[in-house]
Image: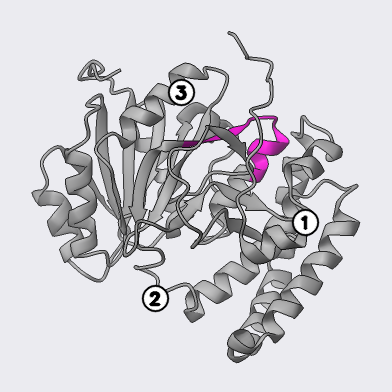
Amino acid sequence: MDEPAPEDKPLLTVCVIAYNSGPLLRRCLESLAAQTFRGFEILVIDNASPDPADAEVAAAAAGVRLIRNTENLGFAGAGNQAAREARGRWLALLNPDAWAEPDWLAELVAAARRHPQVRSFTSRQLMAEDPTLLDGLGDVMSGYGIPYRGGYLAPDPGDTDEAEVFSPCGAAMMVDRSLFLELGGFDEQFFCYCEDVDLGYRLQLAGEPTLVVPRAVIRHEGSATSGGRKSEFAVFHGTRNRFWVVFKDTPALLLPVVLPLHLAAVAYISSRGPNRPHAGLVWRSFVAALEGLPQVMRSRARVQRRRRVSALAIARAMTWNPKDLTARRPVLRPLRPTPRAGA
């Protein structure tokens, strides 16, 4: 498991997309340098960061291939750029505000070898400031069209069984690069936020499971480079992009159910005390979502043509229990059989 791949063909490419990351990026790269699995390359994309420290930190780190963008492509655009530039079979993404335990990659690679039918993996994420709490245990999609990180701020359950989740979290995921490219990568219309959920939804539609590997552990600051979870940037892009995910990816039979539930849920969440100051911003995000709807509709047509599973299978992959959403409970399911099982 720990043998390096041939030098000219690493098994895995780890990409870190940096934007105003500063000291966080240094800690992230130090954690990659300490990995016990060595058959990988490190690609840092400086996404036109105003802070020159990002490029300086990456350039000073041993074994790092640095790409400096002249414009900010967002996480989605830079993620697609990484897939095009990567040389490994597997593409791993690690946020610059996260750092990995030394066996993070070893555990992901071992899981891929145990489950050759699986081509998408996600990690157990702990809160950086308090590692007794979860930052996430796979992403969940609710029947209300509101995705969330499973177990966010819940006590860390430790090394639980591997299980299927709805989608990987872009902060610490590994995906077969050819599959990523085959599905069209991240949707660059999203720019940032929910592009990983959109990818995970398309994996679901294609019948491609995502496995959470609890022994693959990272610690995550969370939204450290975008102003925090309640920043105007995060609220605007998160609200707009959640609507686009619902409209683009939900099968036609489910859309008349999920779309009204989504609108009702957003209205309810926006009316709650701590969120009321953002009500105007949420409305502007919906206006922007409607303005972008023609392009989303074109994307929807392509996505739904490629669907390989039933609407019922998608409904079963979601959670319809409102208590799961309000408590941000993880939703973990036994790994389903796929056509490549045992191959």
Give the number of the disc on residue 227: 2
CB contact under 8 Å: marks 1 and 2? no
Q: Amino acid at mark 1?
A: Asn
> Residue 196 versus residue 104: which sits nearer the camera?
104
> Residue 73 versus residue 266: which sits nearer the camera?
266
Q: Which label sits in the foreground, 1 or 3?
A: 1
Residue 87 visible in rendering: no
**Within-10-Å neighbours for mark 1: few <14, some 14–19, many 20+:** few
CB contact under 8 Å: marks 1 and 3? no
Circle 3 residue: 112
Quadrant of residue 281 in the image?
A: bottom right
Q: Residue at x 17, y 66 (%)?
A: 52
> Residue 56 versus residue 270: which sits nearer the camera?
270
Residue 92 visible in rendering: yes
Seen in the picture, residue 150 relative to 284 is either above or below; the reply is above
First along the sequence among labels 1 and 3: 3
Q: CA distance from mark 1 to mark 2?
A: 31 Å
Stretch in magenta: 201-213
Seen in the picture, residue 75 relative to 283 is either above or below; the reply is above
